[in-house]
Amino acid sequence: MRTLLTLLTACIFAIASAQEIRLTSQSFTTEKPLFVVNGEHTAYDDLSYIKPNDIESIEVIKNQQAIDRYGEAGKNGVVVVTLKNFKKPKATEEPVDQNSSIFLRKYSTGAQPLYVLDGKIIQQEDVEKIDPKNIESIEVLKDEKATNQYGDEGKNGVIVITSKKPPMKKQ
């Protein structure tokens, strides 16, 4: 099994390397596929740190399917590597209120940002009561941008939340 995984890995890298050099009308160019390991875009050079025994699966995606899934970054193809024992990260803390839709972590420094909902300053408890389905966008302001817009109240950063507006009725 180890020999098979090693051979498979070597074949994938050989195919990817063979696709790197393409002849253009003027010179040679280097075009590498996108490498994705456990859902994260990964540099080609970092693949050498992966041990063959740690690989669960390798998927090669080409052409329009690669562009559809990974956008312009997938135009040269995508090599998707999933490692054994990979589990999606879970939240490190449980929400305080089980009915709450949004959970905000406490800062270790005790400093809390300013929360603004549709132009009005609100408390953290009010943010946790917002239904995520009603949020249009969230913007984080830091440093000078936060203090320029919100003065001293924004010194710890500002979380600006814009809620979805109900559609206007036609008259």
Image (tube, rainbow, N blue to C red):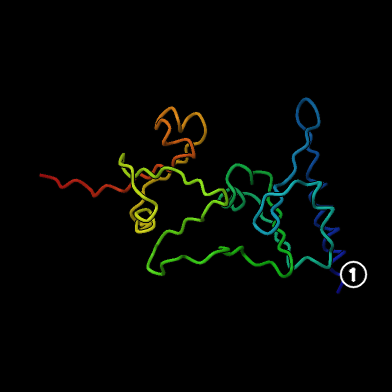
What's the residue at 87%, 64% (across, down)? 6
Q: What is the total number of numbered labels drawn onto the structure image?
A: 1
What's the residue at 40%, 62% (across, down)? 101
Q: Which residue lies furthest to the top in this view?
A: 26
Q: Is mark 1 on a helix, strand or loop?
A: helix
Instruction: Answer few, some or many: residues within 10 Å of disc 1's Cα (few below 14, many 20 plus, some between 14 and 19).
Output: few
Tell me the residue that label 1 is attached to: 3
What's the residue at 83%, 63% (across, down)? 8
Corner quadrant of residue 150: top left
Q: Nearer the viewer, residue 5 or 86?
A: 86
Q: Which residue lies furthest to the right in this view?
A: 3
Residue 104 at x, y percent in the picture: 47, 55
Residue 94 at x, y percent in the picture: 51, 67
Residue 129 at x, y percent in the picture: 35, 59
Q: Is residue 27 above or below residue 164?
A: above
Q: Is residue 29 above or below residue 91?
A: above
Q: Is residue 93 above or below residue 160?
A: below
The quarter of the image holding the C terminus is top left
Q: What residue type is labelled 1?
A: Thr
Q: In this view, does 52 lie to the left or right of 84?
A: right
